[in-house]
Image (spheres, grey):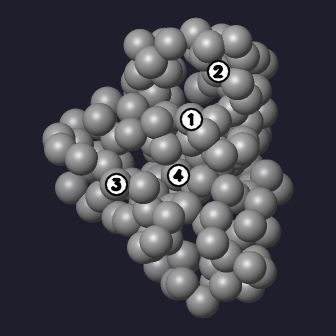
Amino acid sequence: MIVDLPDLEAMERFGRRLAERLQPGDVVALSGGLGAGKTTLSRAILHALGHEGEVPSPTFTIVEPYDHLSPPIVHADFYRLEHPSEAQQLGLDEYREDAVLIAEWPENAGGFGNEPECLQITLETAGNGRKAIVKSGSAWQGRWS
């Protein structure tokens, strides 16, 4: 499925749509080049779930938990990882317990596409906006269409 995101308002609507469907254990895997909108979409999801204030990119901290949200969110940016084994060293499984993982640069952590709970979103520039190419795992069937 392809979702057109011509402006920031469309990105925010898309983030709200995603937030409404999230369940603990889900993975939202965000791929795309630098500046494609991965962090912008992450912020839209977090704000739609009720987070107030800034949402810093976790490029340097790698993992940023938002335990106060329902469901709890773990926002991770794997850009700086050099090998997928580094994701395991972060204790990612502990962070993910009963939470949703929003993963930027998931391929650097070995990917999550084989997990049924994974919603893969590739963001690409399209004119002045973006487009999202969405592939859903089996756990998303009926929740995403």
Q: Which mark is residue 129?
A: none
According to the picture, the residue beneath numbered tag 2 turns out to be 130
- Relative to 73, residue 81 above or below: below
Tell me which label, 1 or 3, sits earlier in the chain. 1
Tell me which label, 3 or 2, sits earlier in the chain. 3
According to the picture, the residue beneath numbered tag 3 turns out to be 56
Tell me which label, 2 or 1, sits earlier in the chain. 1
- Relative to 28, residue 77 above or below: below
Residue 106 lies in quadrant:
bottom right
According to the picture, the residue beneath numbered tag 1 turns out to be 37
- Where is residue 128? Give x, y as percent: 62, 13
- Where is residue 86? Give x, y as percent: 67, 84
Q: Going by the image, does 109 lie left or right of 114? A: left
Q: Nearer the viewer, residue 5 or 112?
A: 5
Asked whether the beta carbons under mark 2 and mark 1 sit within 8 Å of each other, the answer is yes
Secondary structure of the residue carrying numbered label 2: strand
Secondary structure of the residue carrying numbered label 3: loop
Secondary structure of the residue carrying numbered label 4: strand
- Where is residue 70? Give x, y as percent: 29, 46
Separation of disc 3 and disc 2 at Cα? 21 Å
According to the picture, the residue beneath numbered tag 4 turns out to be 102
Asked whether the beta carbons under mark 3 and mark 2 sit within 8 Å of each other, the answer is no
Which residue is drawn at the image coordinates 54% and 76% (left, top)? 92
- Where is residue 91? Give x, y as percent: 52, 84
Q: Tell me the mark number nearer the camera, choosing from 2 and 4.
A: 2
Q: Amino acid at mark 4?
A: Ile
Which residue is drawn at the image coordinates 60% and 53% (left, top)? 104
